[in-house]
């Protein structure tokens, strides 16, 4: 049985992925914030990337596949991922790195595909690119780069934020000229499960296969969540449409693992 280690398994994506995989693999996870549930679950391991070296945990667990859902300081994340790369080279294991659409945020005239050149104007995007570039030097079988657009879903931080703002009767900032795609947490975890199970290689874009203006997406979500007259504040950073979307083309997943914007909206509003 494959041993999986999810870094950041206490976060929204990492914990959802743990629940998806734990019945099928010997699944372990790391957490940072003290929590009775995680402390009592022997499959979870405390890890502070600011003060600890990940190589100690890796040598102890010897995972076959590492899934990185880490959040936190960029320098600490970079150092941690470079230690993971040393482990991969020494033991011929695999890393699945969750990246972001922001690695393309300098390109605004069109959506981006898996093997397009990355270029970012944001600190966040450049940080993700640095780790991606290090992984791209590895043999293909030792990594996956999974680029995600906005992730919604029941209990997601984005849905919670929308509810909080609208419950306070505050205006919700929307971007009418930004064209995006999106995804939903349940589909993301199924997609990652498939990639692990079939040992797929390379770069994947795990977003919806259609595009929408960000304001239209938020309007659909608020309507589906039951808000009749939400307040919106339009934010324009350009006179033209600006794309921030990662579409699948070269590494498409099976039809049942693809998702549309309307499916994202419906799944995110489920009780």
Image (cartoon, grey):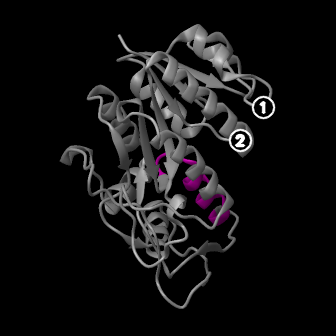
Q: Is residue 76 magenta?
A: no
Q: Please state, as top left, top right, bottom left or bottom right, where the N terminus lies in the image.
A: top left
Residue 64: image x %, image y %?
43, 18
Helix, strand or loop at mark 1 = loop
| Residue segment shown in magenta | 152-166
Helix, strand or loop at mark 2 = loop
Q: Is residue 141 left or right of residue 229?
A: left
- Tell me the crowding category of disc 1: few under 14, some 14 to 19, or many 20 or more residues within 10 angstroms, Cα based: few
Q: Is residue 163 magenta?
A: yes
| Label 1 or label 2, whichever comes before in sequence order | 1
Which residue appears at 56% of the width and 52% of the height?
129
| In the image, farthest residue toward the left | 255
Question: Which residue bears the numbered disc 2?
Answer: 72
Among the 4 quarters of the image, the one containing residue 175: bottom right
Tag of residue 50: 1
Q: Is residue 238 above or below residue 25?
A: below
């Amino acid at each position: 049985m494959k041993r999986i280690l999810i870094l950041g398994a206490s976060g929204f994506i990492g914990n959802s992925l743990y629940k998806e995989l734990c019945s099928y693999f010997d699944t372990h996870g790391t957490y940072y914030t003290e929590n009775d549930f995680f402390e009592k679950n022997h499959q979870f391991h405390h890890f502070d990337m600011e003060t600890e070296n990940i190589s100690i945990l890796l040598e102890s667990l010897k995972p076959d596949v590492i899934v990185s859902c880490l959040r936190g300081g960029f320098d600490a994340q970079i150092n941690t991922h470079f230690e993971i790369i040393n482990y991969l080279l020494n033991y011929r294991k695999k890393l699945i790195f969750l990246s972001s659409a922001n690695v393309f945020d300098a390109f605004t005239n069109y959506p981006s595909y898996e093997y397009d050149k990355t270029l970012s104007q944001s600190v966040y995007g450049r940080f993700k690119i640095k780790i991606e570039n290090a992984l791209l030097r590895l043999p293909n079988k030792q990594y996956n780069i999974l680029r995600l657009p906005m992730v919604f879903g029941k209990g997601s931080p984005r849905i919670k934020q929308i509810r909080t703002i609208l419950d306070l009767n505050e205006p919700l900032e929307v971007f009418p000229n930004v064209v995006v795609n999106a995804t939903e947490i349940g589909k993301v975890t199924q997609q990652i499960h498939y990639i692990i199970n079939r040992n797929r290689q390379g770069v994947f874009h795990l977003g919806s296969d259609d595009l929408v203006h960000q304001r239209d997406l938020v309007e659909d979500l608020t309507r589906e969540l039951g808000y009749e007259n939400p307040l919106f504040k339009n934010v324009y950073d350009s006179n033209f449409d600006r794309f921030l979307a990662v579409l699948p083309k070269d590494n498409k997943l099976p039809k049942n693992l693809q998702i549309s914007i309307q499916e994202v909206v419906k799944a995110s509003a489920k009780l």
